[in-house]
Image (cartoon, rainbow, N blue to C red):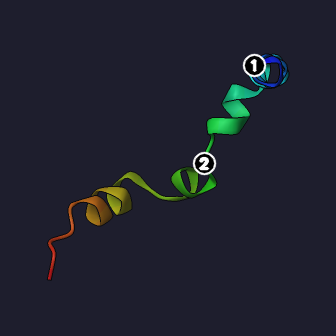
Amino acid sequence: MEELVKFSLLTRDASPYLVDRYSQRKESAAELSKRVNQRPS
């Protein structure tokens, strides 16, 4: 429990950095829509 509290305090202000995904920034909305709406073959 103590480790969880320490980790939470250390990462509390870093959430924008931790949840930012390079692949989502790089991909355009059209490409994302095309990839997500693929039909199974």
Which residue is at 85% across, 20% downward? 6
Which residue is at 56% across, 50% downward? 25
**Residue 9: image tag:** none
| Of residues 10 and 39, the one drawn nearer to the viewer in this rendering | 10
**Secondary structure beneath label 1:** loop
Q: Are marks 2 and 1 in contact (CB under 8 Å)?
A: no
Residue 33, compared with residue 21, is above or below; it is below
Q: Residue 2: name its quadrant.
A: top right
Tag 1 residue? 1
Q: Position of residue 10 (x, y in %)?
A: 85, 23
Q: Residue 19: name its quadrant.
A: top right
Q: Position of residue 16 (x, y in %)?
A: 67, 29
Residue at the limit of the structure toward the bottom, as seen here: 41
Q: Position of residue 35 (x, y in %)?
A: 31, 65
Q: Residue 40: name its quadrant.
A: bottom left
Badge 1 density bin: few <14, some 14–19, many ≥20, Cα 10 Å: few
**Secondary structure beneath label 2:** loop
| Of residues 30 and 4, the one drawn nearer to the viewer in this rendering | 4
Mark nearer the viewer, 2 or 1? 1
**Residue 21: image tag:** 2
Badge 2 density bin: few <14, some 14–19, many ≥20, Cα 10 Å: few
Q: Position of residue 38 (x, y in %)?
A: 21, 69
Query: Position of 38 compared to 14: left or right?
Result: left
Residue type at the position of mark 2: Arg
First in sequence: mark 2 vs mark 1: 1
Residue type at the position of mark 1: Met
Query: Position of 8 compared to 37: left or right?
Result: right
Residue at the limit of the structure toward the front, as seen here: 1
Which residue is at 63% across, 53% downward? 22
Could you give the CA–CA distance between mark 2 and mark 1, rounded to whole angstroms?
28 Å
